[in-house]
Amino acid sequence: GLSRFELGLDSPDGRAIAFARGDWQRPEVDVVVVHVDGGDHRRVTRAVGVIPPLAWAPGGRIVFATWLGPGTLRVFVIGADGRGGET
């Protein structure tokens, strides 16, 4: 069966793709940014319970949610470089 997944979203300027990458059998999910020009890719965070899809926020930040249990979500905003995480 299918054990890995990757779900991506183009940045508003078209220069990068943010995606969630994980394994259906593990709770950890990587949020990764890849530059479409073939340049650098960076894991900006590893989190438990990330719920794809991701979204791009103003200023090149990435928004994602994590599931903490029944009825409990936490929303994060983090820079595409992995800095400035906030909830």
Image: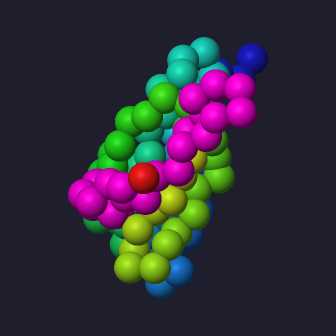
- Residue 74 visible at all: yes
Vertical side of 16 occupied by 50: above or below: above
- Residue 36 visible at all: no
Q: Quadrant of residue 59?
A: bottom left
Residue at (57% x, 63% y) in the render? 55
Q: Nearer the viewer, residue 27 or 41?
A: 27
Count of numbered circles on the image:
0
Residue 78 is inside the magenta segment: yes
Q: Quadrant of residue 15?
A: bottom left
What are the residue bounds of the magenta stretch? Answer: 66-86
Vertical side of 49 occupied by 56: above or below: below
Residue 49 is inside the magenta segment: no
Outermost right residue: 1
Expressed as whole percent of the image width and height from the top left, the position of residue 38 reads 35, 65
- Left or right of 29 on screen, residue 33: left
Residue at (35% x, 63% y) in the render? 80
- Left or right of 78 on screen, residue 70: right
Expressed as whole percent of the image width and height from the top left, the position of residue 78 reads 37, 58
Expressed as whole percent of the image width and height from the top left, the position of residue 76 reads 46, 52
Outermost bottom residue: 13
Quadrant showing the N terminus: top right
Image coloring type: rainbow
Expressed as whole percent of the image width and height from the top left, the position of residue 56 reads 52, 69
Residue at (40% x, 74% y) in the render? 60
Q: Nearer the viewer, residue 25 or 86?
A: 86
Q: Nearer the viewer, residue 73 or 11?
A: 73
